[in-house]
Amino acid sequence: MDNKNLLYVGIIIALVIAVAAPFIASSNPDGLESAFFGIFGAKEIHGSELDEDAAGAAEEQVQEITGNTFSFGSPFPDYSIEGMEKAGEALAIAIGTLLVLGIAFGLGRVLSRSD
Amino acid sequence: MHIPDAFIPLTQAAVYWVIALVFIALSLRWARNEMREEKVPLVAVLAAGIFAIQAVNVPIPWGTSGHMMGAALAAIVLGSPFAAVFVLTLVLIVQGVLFGDGGITVMGANIINMGVVGGFVGFYSFKGLNAAFKNPYPAAFIAGWLSLVVAALVCAVEMAIAGTFPLELGLFSMGLYHAVIGVIEGGITAVALYLIYTARPDLLKSPAGVTA
C-alpha cells in the first residue's frame, strides 16, 4: 500500500468510526466523572445508579473547592450541533476528525524532513 | 479522563501548562528532526483515527464508560514517545476548543496525562516487553493497558493535589475503572499495530523494533 492509499484507507476508517460513534457510544459517565460522582456522593463507586440532583450539586461543590469557575462556550459542546440529534453528533465528530487530519498533515508537512 | 476546568485550581493548572509546553516544544523538535516526509500521512491518519476512536465510549461495569486514549499506539507506531505528545496535543486542542471535551485552563494537565505519561509509559514498556517476549502484539496489549492505568493514577494524584479527590479513594476508583478500560486500550493498540504492520511493514522497521 503506497502512502496515498494509506492516507485514503486511513481517512475512510477514521470517518466510519467518527460517524458510527454517536450511535454506538455509551453515555455513561467516563472513568474520571464516575470517580468524581462516587467521591461526591452522586453514585456508589461500585454502583451504576447516578443521582442527577446530587451530580449537579457535586459540580457546583467542586467549583467552590478549587475556585476555578472558568467557563468557555465551545461551538459544539459535547460534540453536538444545535437542533440536530445523533446526525449532528456524527457530523460534529466527522468535522473534528477531518480538522485533526488537516492540522496534523499541514503541520507535518511544514516540520518534516524531506530526505 | 479529560479533566474539566472546575477540577483544578488556576495556579496549579498554570503549572501543568508550563510543564506541558516544555514537552510540546520537545515534540515539535522531534517532528523537525525525526519525522520523515514519507511518514506524514501516517502521522495525520493516526491523529484523525485517535480523535475518532476517542469519541467511542465503551460501557464498562459500575455504570461507567471509557474510551481509548491512543498515546501508546502513536508512540509505538511512530517510534517515539514525543510522537504521542505531538498527536495527543493536537487531538486535545481540537476536543477542548471545539467540543468542550476537557477544559481549557486544565488542558496542560490533560496533555501531561494522556500525551506525556501515556506516550512515555506506552513506548518504554512496549520496548522492554517486546525485547522480553520477542512478540510485539502481547507487548503492545500490556503497554496499552499500562499507559492508560498509569495516566489515570497520575490524574488521581493531580486531583488529590487539587483537593478535589481524597488521595486513596481517588487512586482506588480511578485505578479500578481504568484497569477495565485499559483492556480496550490494550486490545485496540495490539490490533491496530497488527493492521498497520500488515499494510506497511516498512514504516515500522525502525526504531521501535517491531518484528512480526
Image: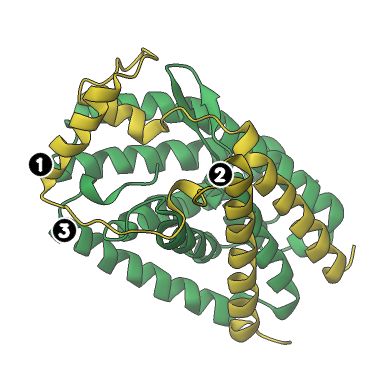
Give how far across and how far down residue B94 sits, in percent. Answer: 48, 62
The subunit carrying tag 1 is A
Q: Indicate the colouring scheme.
A: by chain
Type of amino acid at the residue the image marks with label 1 = Ile
Q: Colour of chain B?
A: green
- Report x, y in % for residue A112: 63, 82
Give the farthest residue toward the right.
A1
Q: What residue is rendered at 61% in x and 85% in y?
A: A110
Element under label 1?
Answer: helix
Q: Colour of chain A?
A: yellow
Q: Chain of mark 2?
A: B
Dot 1 crowding, Cα within 10 Å, few <14, some 14–19, many 20+? some
Report the residue at 16% width, 38% height from top: A60
Please tell me if label 1 and label 2 are on a single chain: no
Residue A31 lies, with reference to residue B154, above or below; the image says above
Quarter of the image for residue B201 reads: bottom right
Residue B166 position within the rendered picture, expressed as x and y whole percent measured from the top left: 16, 30
Q: Nearer the viewer, residue A92 or B203?
A: A92
Q: Quadrant of residue B150?
A: top left
Asked if badges 1 and 3 are on one and the same chain, I answer: no
Residue that badge 3 annotates: B10
Label 3, label 2: how far apart the Cα atoms are: 27 Å
**Residue marked by disc 2:** B55
Secondary structure state at the residue bearing disc 2:
loop
The residue lying at 66 percent from left, 85 percent from top is A113
Q: Amino acid at mark 2?
A: Ala
Q: Which residue is mark 1?
A: A65
